[in-house]
Amino acid sequence: MNQVPQVSHQEFKDTYELKDILDRGTFSLVRKAVVRSTNELVAVKIVDTSNFPGAEGVVQRELEALMVVQHPNCIQMRAYCRNSNYVYIVVNLARGEVLVDWLQEKRQCTELETAIIVHGILQGVFYLHSNNIVHRDLKLDNLMFESPGDINSLKILDFGFSKVLQGTGDILQTICGSPQYIAPEILNITTSGMNQPIPYTQAVDLWSIGVIMYMLIAGYAPFDEDNEMKMYHKIIKGEFSFPSDPWDNVSNQAKELIYGLLNVDPMRRMTVPQAIASPFITKYARLYTNVPNSSSGSASTIPQRLKTT
């Protein structure tokens, strides 16, 4: 476990000087801060636990995950502080773009750019899953480059919906995630009509990566609908397509990886090692900053809906 100190509120104020607001959420905000002794810049997430029901549970999940996380593709906590109204989480400051803003300006990614970004996500998620952490809210808004324009410096952010599994008996059954990225098995919990929720697995993170990969290449979501219920119906059925713009000019290897990640059956969905071993990811291997943590999982297990080129 990462040794992250909990400091008193007075120690926090003595150590850090809060600066500009970087981002706002429903019950939290992120501010830039300066380490008084070194002038180093950091980021501080400030969560209001007094005025928002449920905020305490969210911040507790985030702290439990960040206590463990220590990987180059994940944001890292340096210290935290609690008082009667707020929780302060100090993390390393990433200076690059949030992917949702970067993609909005760029509109579409090349296959090379997509492979490098998806590889970084897979690296981080492999580490998380290996440490029994399921993120459950992977999306463009929760991904950021550490350095401006450096697509090899990707960081996974925001562990508020994450779950640290405590053993084989610990199950996932909370309905959470963001609408366009949510896995069908989570949606099936709400439509099963059963009194007891149906557990799901860490495979929900792989579904979200499939959605992210599709959006990077196309610039739009695979299950894009103005009506949210229609979108959920498409997600549950796995109904998506590859329209000619831009998919006529995209390799079958990229499409195969998306098919493998967006399999509605979580037991048949690609795992992280299988995705890392896929032809689309491996063909750019020489360009990745970080060597994959695992190459286990044969590429021969990838569903062959298309002939690869």
Image (cartoon, grey):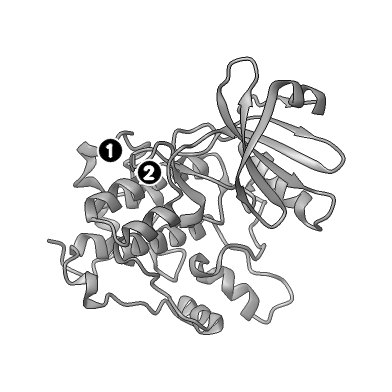
Q: Position of residue 115 (x, y in %)?
A: 28, 50
- Front one among 252 and 192: 252
Instruction: Reply above or below: 118 against 247.
Output: above
Drawn side of residue 76 relative to residue 50, left or right: left
Residue located farthest toward the top when viewing the structure as drawn: 37
State whether residue 3 is above or below residue 270. Answer: above
Disc 1 marks which residue?
288
> Which residue, as the protein is rendered here, is positioned at the far right?
84
**Residue at the image position 26 percent from the left and 64 percent from the top:** 256
Q: Label 2 is placed on what type of residue?
A: Gly
Q: Is residue 160 in sight in this rendering? A: yes
User: Which amino acid does the dot numbered 1 rest on?
Assistant: Tyr
Q: Secondary structure at mark 1?
A: loop
How much space separates mark 2 and mark 1, taking CA atoms?
8 Å
Query: In x, y percent, where is residue 232?
Result: 52, 78
Asked if residue 188 lies left or right of residue 181, the reply is right
Instruction: Give the residue at mark 2.
Output: 120
- Split into 4 quadrants, where in the image is the N terminus? top right
Q: Earlier in the sequence, mark 2 or mark 1?
A: 2
Q: Is residue 166 visible?
A: no
Percent x, y of residue 110: 23, 56
